[in-house]
Amino acid sequence: IARLVGITPFVPSVICRQFPNIRSFTANNASLETIRHFTECRDLAYLDLSDNLITEIQGSAFSNNQELEYLDLSKNAIIDANDYSFYMLSNLKMLNLGQNPGIQLPGLVFSFLLNLEDLHLDHCDISTIQNEWFYNTTNLNKLYLNDNPLHNISDNVFRNLGSLRILDLSS
């Protein structure tokens, strides 16, 4: 377990090289601005990068993290994600993107998260939910979309979420 506070953006890559078998990594409030440092932490199961300055998720940021089950990117300034931001994270069960105002999420951003159970998209200034977001997330149990200015929710957006137990759309 590694827990780092107030680190430079290059420290995560150094930690991953020195401790390639690390399973849990916390670097919240560490002034990280981008994610491109965790490809060498192949056994990582828990990653908390909340409360940083991250603005983008590069397409290959997690390409070697197939064991990742928990990913917290909340309380950042993420505005740019792409269809492959979470590609190869087939074991991910919890993803927290909450409190990233202005985040732009393309249609297929969650399509590779086949085992996702818990998704936080609260406080993100989301006004429209795209139909494609939840196409392959059939194991999703909890979906938090609260405190967003939702204006447009199509009839079919939640149709593949047969396992959903908690849906929070409150404001």
Image (tube, rainbow, N blue to C red):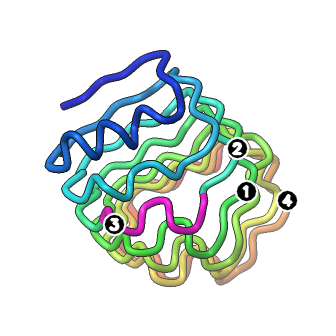
Mark 4 touches mark 3? (CB < 8 Å): no
In this rendering, position of residue 12 left or right of residue 1: right
Looking at marks 1 and 4 on the same chain, the residue that comes earlier in the sequence is marked by: 1
Mark sitting on residue 104: none
Residue at image mark 3: 64
The type of residue carrying mark 2 is Thr
Near-viewer residue (154 or 2)? 2
Which element type, helix, strand or loop, lies under badge 3?
loop
Which residue is at a point 72% across and 67% down the rendered structure image? 129
**Are there few (<14), some (14-19), or many (20+) residues within 10 Å of tag 4?**
few
Q: Which residues are magenta?
A: 58-65
Residue under label 1: 80
Q: Residues within 10 Å of mark 1 (few under 14, many from 20)?
A: some
From the image, which quarter does the C terminus lie in? top right
- Where is residue 85 drawn, in percent x and y? 55, 66
Q: Marks 2 and 1: in contact by CB < 8 Å?
A: yes
Residue 55 is marked as 2
- Mark closest to the chain's N terminus, 1 or 2: 2
How far is the residue under mark 2 from the one under mark 4?
A: 25 Å
Residue 26 as seen in the image, left or right of residue 121: left
Residue at horizontal 55 percent and vertical 27 percent from the top: 51
Q: Which amino acid does the dot numbered 3 rest on?
A: Asn
User: For the residues marked 2 and 3, what is the alpha-carbon distance in whole angstroms?
Assistant: 21 Å
Rendered position, 66 above or below 127: below
Please say if 29 is above or below 36: above
Answer left or right for 153 relative to 28.
right
Can residue 59 be found in the magenta stretch?
A: yes
Q: Residue at left 77%, top 53%?
A: 126
